[in-house]
Amino acid sequence: MDIRDRIIQFVDYKGLSFNFFEKNIGASKSYISNTKNISAKVVSNILRIYPELSPEWVLTGEGSMFKKENAVKSNFPVKSEDKGVPYYNVDFVGGFDLVINDQTTIPEYLIDFPKYNEATCWCNVTGHSMEPEITHGDIIALKKIEDISFLPYGEIYAIVTKNEMRTIKRIGPSQNKDCYSLIPTNKSPEYGVQELPKEMVRIVFKVLGCMKRL
């Protein structure tokens, strides 16, 4: 069994289609099935995109397929065709909620990351108000809050208001009992605490976590 055979074995084990796998690693269509000697660049891309995969196993066949089989599920996010949470290539502030409410919208792919698999979806983030916690260009895992009558303070939420404004902020108490304080992480003078009337809140997602785009 050579490197190509082991890669095919990995693809079969993950239940991926070769078309999806080749697109994911930046290879041309049918590259894996038609190429006898997989290039070092392609192997490097595979190991980068699928960090749970053991380089030793891929290159030599020694050891197990995964670096640490018990850690695969908990430590590594992976793209998937059939398991995980949908990722939409849309910015939250740019109208993300309109996209996911459109039944004809198809997600870019699924993200299988057990730590955040209770999320409703993943989407993009732009802006700098929550840095360094959430960085411009990150993607965030969002869980829709069905009952918004009580929102615990100190957590980060993605909020859509009744006048179609969208923001991602930490919620805190306000001196006005009818308002939330929206608190940015960035301490730059251009970002300050804002007051949001509770009656203006239309949709709320809890931000479970963030990461760089896969």
Image: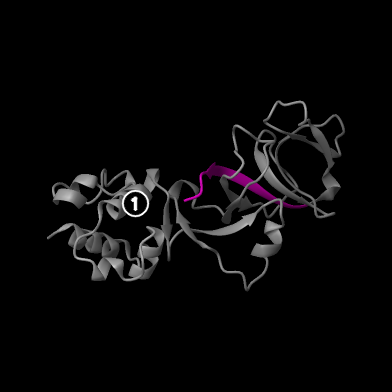
Residue 35, picture quadrant:
bottom left
- Residue segment shown in magenta: 202-214
Residue at screen point 30% across, 55% down: 42
Task: Work out whether residue 102 can be spotted.
Answer: yes
Q: In this view, does 74 lie above or below 18?
A: above
* Secondary structure predominantly adopted by residues drawn in magenta: strand
Residue located beneath label 1 in the image: 45
Asked if the magenta segment contains residue 204, the reply would be: yes
Amino acid type, residue under disc 1 in the picture: Asn
Image quarter of the N terminus: bottom left
Q: In this view, does 89 lie above or below 184?
A: below
Q: Position of residue 5 (x, y in %)?
A: 18, 62
Q: Position of residue 102 (x, y in %)?
A: 67, 69
Vertical arrangement, residue 131 with respect to residue 9, above or below: above
> Is residue 33 inside the magenta stretch?
no
Which residue is at a point 36% across and 66% down the rendered structure image? Answer: 28
Decide which of 116, 105 is in the foreground and name it: 105
Whether residue 130 sits left or right of residue 212 in the image: it is right
Residue 16: x percent and y percent? 35, 66
Q: Left or right: 63 with respect to 40?
A: left
Q: Nearer the viewer, residue 117 or 3?
A: 3
Q: Where is residue 46 in the image (x, y as percent from the top left)?
A: 32, 53
Identify the colour scheme used: one colour
